[in-house]
């Protein structure tokens, strides 16, 4: 789509937000969540906030939007998942070592193995390419796990189930990795479930444990949570195609590109291939469909739970704008070329604050943010069972 049309869509979003502000008569958005005071931050809170900032600027931005009663456990959950990610991404570990360490870490989270032994083994095996923040996280594993084991039984069960699925799934995909892509869309669904959909399920369990009003919608939320996670993960996969390729990984489905006339074994030789772009377009449509489910998920959260809605909406908005940048520059060769600007992030935040309670306005903003993307395609059974 032409850049002028995209700029026009951005302008319409800005106009709609301005109108909303004029109607509400207040520029600041919703009132703070009643639990946000929550008392002074503890040393554990400071540690987790510091580690979050060092390993993920996105989640360091979104998690503090949650109610105080959820903030600590969700921060901890993300750090646990990031430890598994660190094992998966470590280039100096062979698949057998990755499986053993993933299994060991799942046992650590479950309380069956000491965290110190795990950290002492993994930390010195991290290569120079490991980001400093992830290195610090591995060294602080004992403290992170001590926080984990201080949560309620229901919260610990939610975290433990997530880490077990993620650890097993990531190890299996690392063992089967060829560098030429996944076999088909079902394999992509399964991969996205193991690394992101299961996180959506875990968050939903935590939200339901926190709020009886949310728990009433549990049966509807759980499948949408998996789709929500896949939408975010597919956005990351598409954004990071070329960096993944450089480290010998490819999470694109071979069948989609084969049908478009492109062989993923040739990935990188001709990034401007029309056949490759046709395959990319289909995946953009699928990711778009999953993000529609993400909005459906968010609208099932009671409108008074504005903090949780913000947490969801910021992720959806940033993912949508990233997909638009990818769609506008399908021949990109580096993730930096499709990274959204700080202005776009601010636009998402303001739009969320002005619209968080209104289903009609949120749907309108979603349509505007998705303007020009390939028509959404919805897939069922996204767990890849």
Image (cartoon, rainbow, N blue to C red):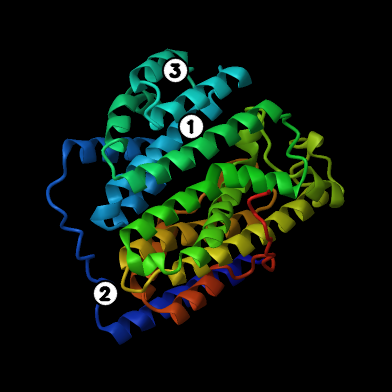
Labels 2, 3: front one: 3
Mark earlier in primary sequence (1, 2): 2
Q: Residue furthest bottom?
A: 23
Disc 3, SS:
helix
Q: Is residue 286 above or below residue 272?
A: below
What is the x, y in percent for residue 217? Answer: 45, 68
What residue is at 84 percent from the left and 45 percent from the top?
262
Q: Is residue 54 above or below residue 192?
A: above
Disc 2, SS:
loop
Mark earlier in primary sequence (3, 1): 1
Q: Could you say which is closer to the camera, residue 330 or residue 202?
A: 202
How much space separates mark 1 and mark 2, taking CA atoms?
A: 41 Å
What is the x, y in percent for residue 73? Answer: 32, 46
Q: Is residue 131 visible?
A: no
Dot 2 crowding, Cα within 10 Å, few <14, some 14–19, many 20+: few
Labels 1, 2: front one: 1
What is the x, y in percent for residue 356? Answer: 37, 72
How much space separates mark 2 and mark 3, taking CA atoms?
A: 48 Å
How much space separates mark 3 and mark 1, taking CA atoms?
A: 11 Å
What is the x, y in percent for residue 287? Answer: 63, 57
What residue is at 62 percent from the left and 21 percent from the top?
95
Q: Verify CB contact (< 8 Å) between mark 2 and mark 3.
A: no
The residue beneath circle 3 is: 122
Disc 1, SS:
helix
Q: Which label number is shown at residue 27?
A: 2
The residue beneath circle 1 is: 84
Dot 3 crowding, Cα within 10 Å, few <14, some 14–19, many 20+: some
* Residue 215 figure quarter: bottom left
Q: Is residue 322 above or below residue 241?
A: below
């Amino acid at each position: 789509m032409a850049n002028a049309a995209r700029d026009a869509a951005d302008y319409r979003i800005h106009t709609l937000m301005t109108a909303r502000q004029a109607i509400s008569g207040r520029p600041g958005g919703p009132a703070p969540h009643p639990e946000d005071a929550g008392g002074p931050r503890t040393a554990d809170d400071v540690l987790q906030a510091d580690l979050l900032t060092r390993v993920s600027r996105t989640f360091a931005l979104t998690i503090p939007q949650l109610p105080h009663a959820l903030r600590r456990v969700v921060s901890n959950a993300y750090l646990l998942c990031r430890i598994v990610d660190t094992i998966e991404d470590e280039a100096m570990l062979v698949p057998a070592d990755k499986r053993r360490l993933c299994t060991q870490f799942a046992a650590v989270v479950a309380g069956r193995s000491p965290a110190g032994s795990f950290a002492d083994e993994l930390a010195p095996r991290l290569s120079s390419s490991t980001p400093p923040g992830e290195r610090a996280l591995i060294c602080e594993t004992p403290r992170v796990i001590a926080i984990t084991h201080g949560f309620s039984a229901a919260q610990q069960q939610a975290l433990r189930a997530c880490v077990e699925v993620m650890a097993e799934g990531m190890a299996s995909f690392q063992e089967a990795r060829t560098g030429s892509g996944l076999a088909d869309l079902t394999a992509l669904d399964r991969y996205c479930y193991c690394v992101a959909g299961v996180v959506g399920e875990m968050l939903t369990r935590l939200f339901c444990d926190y709020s009886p009003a949310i728990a009433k919608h549990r049966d509807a939320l759980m499948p949408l949570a998996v789709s929500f996670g896949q939408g975010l993960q597919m956005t990351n996969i598409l954004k990071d195609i070329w960096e993944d390729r450089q480290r010998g990984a490819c999470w694109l489905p071979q069948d989609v590109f084969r049908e478009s006339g492109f062989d993923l074994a040739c990935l990188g030789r001709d990034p401007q291939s029309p056949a490759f772009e046709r395959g990319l377009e289909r995946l953009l449509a699928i990711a778009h469909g999953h993000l529609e489910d993400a909005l459906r998920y968010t609208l099932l959260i009671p409108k008074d739970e504005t903090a949780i809605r913000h947490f969801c909406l910021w992720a959806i908005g940033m993912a949508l704008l990233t997909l638009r940048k990818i769609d506008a520059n399908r021949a990109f060769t580096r993730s930096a070329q499709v990274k959204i600007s700080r202005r776009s992030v601010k636009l998402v935040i303001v739009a969320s604050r002005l619209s968080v309670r209104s289903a009609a306005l949120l749907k309108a903003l979603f349509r505007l943010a998705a303007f020009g993307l390939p028509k959404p395609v919805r897939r069922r059974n996204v767990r890849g069972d």
